[in-house]
Image (spheres, rainbow, N blue to C red):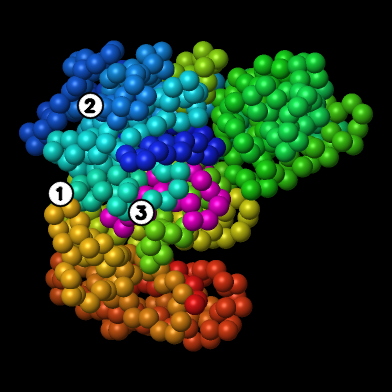
Amino acid sequence: MGICRLGGGRSETILQTSHCWPKRITIESWIRQKCHSVWPESKSFSDEGMGPIPKSWKGICQTGVAFNSSHCNKKIVGARYYIKGYLNYYKKLNATEDCMSPRDMDGHGTHTASTVAGRQVHDAAAFGGFASGTAKGGAPLARLAIYKACWAIPNQEKAEGNTCFEEDMLAAIDDAIKDGVHVLSMSIGTSEPMQYREDGIAIGALHAVKKGIVVSCAAGNSGPAPSTLSNPAPWIITVGASSVDRAFLGPVVLGNGKKIIGQTATPYQLDKMHPLVYAADVAAPGIPKNESDQCLPNSLSPKKVKGKIVLCIRGLGMRVGKGMEVKRAGGVGFVLGNAPQNGNDISVDAHVLPATAVVDTDAIEILNYIKSTNKPKAIIGKGKTVLHYSPAPSMAAFTSRGPNVIDLNILKPDITAPGINILAAWSRGDSPTKLWDDNRIADYVIESGTSMACPHVSAVAALLRAIYPKWSSAAIRSAIMTTAWMKNNKGQPIKDPSGKIADPFQFGSGHFRPSKAADPGLVYDASYDDYVAYLCNYGYSFLGHYHCPKNKTLEPTYNLNYPSVSIPKLNDTVIVKRSVTNVGAAKSVYFFTAKPPVGISIKASPSILYFSSVGHKRSFTLTVAARDAQTAKNYYKNEFAFGWYTWTDSYHYVRSPVAVSLA
């Protein structure tokens, strides 16, 4: 009946660790609703022209600090908050950092809620006028239900993230199920991958799927390291982050006349040249050498920085925090240079002083210039919004990667969606940077993270649920996955920030295409019972009150009817079972094609599928074989390799990624 969200804050890395059960979980740059939930006064949540609240809605509007029943309307149909687990651990909530109600004093929940279902708002723009135009969520007529289960960490900058407790999240999910939501969208990540039995989100999501609710979650912001993704359960849609064709160009001109184009959402500029220094050369005494170039809090010497532009390097700490440190030390501006692992991936910020961010190769060029002259200097120009930027999409460096270490037989993530530099509504209870010393206010802010990608997919799920109310959550996921695209606006393969061709461990099936998902042709369906059987095959002996059959022969978990295939440690030949359901033309014929990894063959039996009606289901097997194991091993270098198989009727192309490693 609406979309409910949980979630967190913003940071370069997941910062919080966990303690015993229930496990504390940190949020990264993702989606959710919290006090940190929603800013109901935003124009994005207007209910003008919306019809009566459906009678199927069973939720409530829970009141609290700065939040009363009038803050719910025909758009925000319900709001609740959950804090028992938090209070059990921290004992009290600091009223200056958060509020005991669904009101958003953080910004992140408002941002993600408006991304998924914000109304159309004309003349919207980020702080400083960036990305000006009409703002609209992916499903603007969907209702929103707010479930706040994440809170500010005491005595820690909100920009570093928030914390969620298992019992609070599970209580929120339970109420969302009872209230009658249709899509549950969460951006909550773990500090490391968690087994299903220990993962509160996975447990709660399984209960939601049993009631027909689609569950969409952020993959996490721990990339580019492999095996880092959160929310790998196969009943969850796991979403990575990629870019859009919009950039925010901000130049820095060096004293030698070289103009380098970075990106920025900072509305300040310098009108004349200023001395330019490298952070490691102006570090305060005692700062570790491996941290001296990263402009961490209290790391710079005011005597050496005053009146200068500082080149800082990404790594530890917050991007916005680096600018604040330069300002504290008396700097007049700064350049944020990517480290090699960040490549050409730039997330823009509304820094507190003139600033621009540059790719790793440009950062090296600026550093070489600083070292080549006795009096290096620079000027930071005014930033501007540029549309139709290319190439796009490209993968975010921060998006968490597969393989799925909880079960290598399930390929994750599932899909990628826009998650870099996304404009959406913001809370007036917090600044654009979420730093304590930043007193600026904005109604719309640009944010990056898998948090921003997840609500895009949640919106598509809501639209598909409206079009096909009887479809299962698995069918909706399948439609989104099998219609995805793997090329950018130059017609080239989607690439990662290092310039290499991206793979399914970064983008799953590819970059989502909502209009195509509305007509997928075939879907890979799965029920709650299928997921229970999967967990029995995974190795659990009982699930709640359900006991797995004792003497039943276990199926390989790669036989779960999933829209992708992952086969680790292939030795010779593996037979994979799948079935597809016709949701296209009543009478149709689909033909099999495949592009397997090098040295691997993929064959389908049967290789032609005949359908006589809508809803007609056909089963098939895939024979995956190592036809030239030595060539494949030399090619893979003990890593996974990727391929695809497709069912097509010449109009629909139902494509599934395949990941294979050799024994």
From the viewer's perspective, is 220 left or right of 273? Answer: left
| Nearer to us in this view, 82 or 276 | 82
Is residue 171 located in the magenta-colored stretch of the structure?
A: no
Give the image location of residue 132, x and y in percent.
48, 27
* 17 or 78: nearer the viewer: 17
Quarter of the rendering containing residue 45: top left
29 in relation to 432, above or below: below
Kindly identify which numbered label has been placed on residue 80. Answer: 2
Residue range corresponding to the magenta coloring: 218-245
**Which residue is painted at 49% across and 77% down in the image?**
663
Would you say the magenta stretch is mainly helix, strand or loop?
A: loop
Question: Which of labels 3 and 1 is toward the front?
Answer: 3
The image shows residue 340 at horizontal and vertical percentages of: 68, 47
Residue 309 tag number: none
Contact, mark 1 vs mark 2 (Cβ under 8 Å) = no
Residue, x 31% and y 27% (percent of image)? 88
Relative to 489, residue 265 above or below:
above
Q: Give yes or no for contact between labels 3 and 1 (Cβ–Cβ under 8 Å).
A: no
Q: Mark 1 points at which residue?
A: 211
